[in-house]
Amino acid sequence: MKLTLRKLESEAPEDLLAAAEALLDHEGVQGLTEVEPNLWTAQADGYEIEVQANSRRATAATCECGLYQEQGLCEHIIAALLSLRARQQEAQEAKKQNEARPSAPTRLTTGTVLDHASHEELASFVRDYARSNRNFAIALKARFASAVPDMRSEDKYLQVLQTTLSAVRKPDRRITIRGAQRLLKVLNELQAQGQLALSQKAFLDALHISQAIITEISPAIGKTKGRQKELLAAVRDAFQQLQALLGAAPSPSIVRQIWSFARAEHAKRLYRSFELDTSFLQLMLEAAQEAEDYEDISGLLSAQQNRYEEAGLNPAPLLLLQVTALEKQGKETAARQLMEQNLAQPDVIAYAVRQARSKQQWPRVKALAQTGLRLSLPPGTQSWLYQQLLELAQQEGDKKSLYTYARLRFLDTLQPELFQLMKKASSKTEWPQRFETTLAQLQQKAYSPALRDAIAFCLAEEGAWPVLMHYATEVQSLDLLEAYSAPLRAHFPEEAAQLFRALINEYAKHHLGRKTAQRIRQALAHLMAAGEKALALDIRKELLEAFGERHALAEELALLSG
C-alpha cells in the first residue's frame, strides 16, 4: 500500500474517504502516537491501527477490522492518515509562525480577530469569501436564512435546499457520497433551526422548514449514492416535526396549511416508493377539524388502497389509518369490525391487541392473541403475541399458561429470567423432566454465544457442575470459563486449571493485536484475583517464551503484578 498524504482525496477510494471524513467529524480517531520513527499507532471505532509513514507518503498500514482483512484498506486507516496529515500541517504552520515571530507573547486566534474586527469590514470579508467559496456560501445561507425579515419564509428555505442540491448534483443529477455529506450538513442545520423555531413558537418557520425538506429532499434520495438512509431519516424527521407542531396547538390557519400541504402531496408515486405517503395521510388525520375532513380522508384512503393493490403493496398501514379515522369519528363498532376482518395483517392484529390492552379488555387480548397464533404471521409477530399471553398469564396467576409461554419465549429469546419463570411455574415433581426437555431443546439449536451462555446459566441454576464442566471443555470458551470459574475450580480444580491454560494459549496462538493482549491480561488477572496466582504466573511465563516477539502482548503481561 502506497498513498501520498497530500493526495489522499484523489488516491483513496471515494467510499472509504467519505467514511473516514465522517469518523473525523465525530472525533473518531484517538491516540495518534509516533511509537518509533515513522511508525504511528492510533485507535478508531475500537480498532487498533498501525501506519508506517514519513512526511510525504504512507508505505504500509494495518487495522484489526474485518474490511481491512478482506481488502487490505479501510476507513480507519484513511482516517488515521488524514489525522496524521493534519498534525504535520499544524506542526509546519507552528514552525513558520515561530520563525516569523520568535518572541511573540500571544497567539493570533480566530476569536481574537473576531473580537477586534469592525462589523463593516467583517461583513465585507464574509461577502467576498462567500462569492469565491460555494460551500461556505451555502453554509452561511442555511445558518442565517431565518434572520432575513423581508422575505417569505417558504421561499427562503426552499432556495437554501435548491441551491445546495444544485451544488452537489452531477450533470446526470446523481449525488456522490461526498455530495450527500455536504447536503446532510445543511439538513442538520435546518433541522436544528426548525426545532428552535418550534420551541420559540415561531410556527411558520418550523412549518416551512419541514415542508422544504420533505418536498426537495425526497426526489433526491433515489439519486444519492451511499447516504440514502440518512436522507430518508431526515425526511421522516421533518414529518415528526410537523406532528410536533400540530401538538403545540398552533393557530387554525397553520393547521389548515398542514392539511392542505398533506392533501396536495400524499398521492405522488415518489412518496409511495419510500413509504412516505402514509405519513401525509397521518398528518391529515391529526389536522382534521370538520366532519367533511374525515369524509375526504376516507375517500383518499380508499383510492390509495386501490393503488396499493395494483402495485402489490402491503395494505396494513392504510387499514390502520382507516381504523383511526373511524375511531376519531366515534364509529368504534365499525373500527372493530374492520380490524377483525383483517387480523391476518401483522400490523392490524398488533394494533387490535394494543387497543384491547389500553381498555383493559383482558379476555379480548387473550382471544386476539390466540387467534393471531393460528394465522400465518411472521415470526416476529408471533413472538410478540406469545409475550402478550405470557404477561397475561402472569397477571392472572395461571401457572400452566405461564410455564407454556415462558418456555416458548425462553427458547426464542434465551433470556435467563424466562427460565426462572418456567421453574417458578413448575412443581417439584414436574420440574426435573421439564428441565431435561428444555435442555435437550436448547442443545438442538444452532450454536451461538447467546445459546452457549443460556445453556451454562441453566446448568449453573440447577447446580449441574459436572455437566457444566464437560460443556465448558466442549465449547472451549474462555468467557464461559471465567463466568463460572469459582464453582468449577471448587468442584474440579485440576480440570479447570488445565482448561484455563489450554484456552489462553490457544487464544494467543490464533489472535493478534493489542485487544488480544489486553484480553489475555484480563484473563490472567482474573485468575490471580481468584487465588490462582501461581497458575497465572506460570501461564504468563509460557506465553512470553512462546510469543516473546509480540510487543503488545509483552507490554500487557508486564502490567501484571507478581
Image (tube, rainbow, N blue to C red):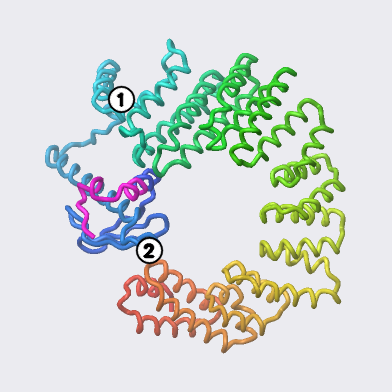
Which residue is at the far left? 100
Element on which disc 1 rests: helix
Return the mark for residue 95: none
Where, by quadrant of the figure, is residue 349 drawn?
top right
Q: Residue at x 66, y 61 (%)?
A: 413
24 is higher (above) or lower (below) than 157: below
Q: Is 240 placed left or right of 217 in the picture?
A: right
Residue 394 % position (x, y) = 82, 56
Callout 2, which amino acid? Glu
Question: Where, quadrant-wise, is the N terminus in this rendering?
Answer: bottom left
Badge 2 is on which residue?
Answer: 64
Element on which disc 2 rests: loop
Say which label, 2 or 1, has the lower sequence index.
2
Secondary structure mostly seen in the magenta stretch: helix
Q: Which residues are magenta?
A: 1-20
Badge 1 is on which residue?
Answer: 115
Mark 2 vs mark 1: in front: 2
